[in-house]
Amino acid sequence: MIEIIPEIDKIEEYQKLAEQYSLGFEYNDFFDPDLLDHREAIREKINRYRQLGRPEKKDTMHGAFFDIVPFSWDSGISRHSLYRMQQSAEIAAELGCRAVIFHAGLRPEFAGNERYYRNWLETMSRVAGELTTQWDVEIYYENVEERSPAQLRELADRLLDESRFGICLDAAHMMLTKGASPEEWFRGLAPYIRHFHLNDHHLKTDEHLALGCGTIDWKDIFEKISQHGLQDKSILLEVNGLEKVNASLEYMKKSCPFI
């Protein structure tokens, strides 16, 4: 299934497009700290989206990520981070989403510090279990700055028995890392991948271009998705604006063999 990011001020156009192509939504409204501090504004947006009558468990939501460090040694930061993650899971459940995506959050410059790494590993695995227990949503952790799949694989292995945990592989982030090849990322994480984020760039920074407008080798990415048996996993076209959404959909129709 293909997903797109809706814009609430143009929601009728996005809903029409979603109905035309049987698309899912990934809501990107609810990671904004300014919004998360105002319950009435949150409720208004939830109600607006719920009025669309979206199918239950079809959509996903991006969780809070600004300064979210639940494994911080600073107890105040860790408490507030956990609060934001709980808030995200609660909103996703109210929207009827099947999953909420969080950044895994491992900073590569600190990953060699044993205390830091073990605290990240233990905290992030515990939090995923707690969130899936409290709310009827799946929890996906997304790669961002991690230099290889090894750490995410170790975390996912700890959650092997948690059926509602998975990995969101962000291909654009993956292509900016220098520590592992795309094949190593796929081979390392394939058993746990539930969701993909796709957007294009020129291999220097995460530009969030429409697919086909950068230099990522999408033929290779699509082949790896197929080779590792991941064709049935959901794919978010992580671009903003109807022009980029439509361009990416056209590219997928022409270039992706399993869509």
Image (cartoon, rainbow, N blue to C red):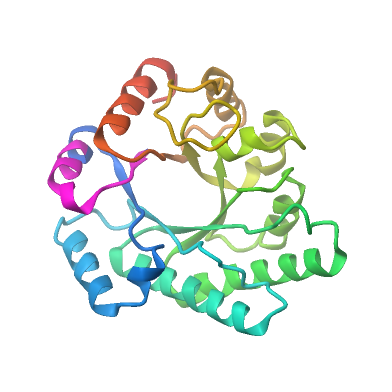
Q: In the rendered view, would you say 89 is above or below 166?
A: below
Furthest residue toward top: 254
* Quarter of the image that includes the N terminus: top left
Q: Residue 189: x percent and y percent? A: 67, 43
Tell whether position 6 is magenta.
yes
Q: Is residue 40 left or right of residue 166?
A: left
Q: Where does residue 160 sit, x and y in percent of width and height?
A: 67, 58
* Residue in the image at 70% along x and 52% along y: 152
- From the image, which quarter does the C terminus lie in? top left
User: Which residue does the image show at 49% across and 32% down from the upper left?
Assistant: 231
> Does residue 145 show up magenta in the picture?
no
Task: Give percent across and percent down for residue 133.
Answer: 51, 75
The image shows residue 237 at horizontal and vertical percentages of 40, 37
Left or right: where 55 falls relative to 131: left
Residue at coordinates 25% horizontally, 35% vertically from top-left?
242
**Quadrant of the rendered image containing residue 212:** top left
For the image, the number of numbered tags is 0
Q: Say if 240 sits above or below 134 in the image.
A: above
Question: At 45% from the left edge and 62% from the top edge, which residue is drawn?
Answer: 63
- Residue nearer the viewer, 183 or 232: 183
Nearer to me, 56 or 249: 249
Q: From this view, report whether residue 219 is shown above or below residue 42.
A: above
Q: Is residue 142 left or right of residue 158?
A: left
Q: Which residues are magenta?
A: 2-17
Tell me: 258 left or right of 49. right
Please identify the dominant SS of the magenta region.
Answer: helix
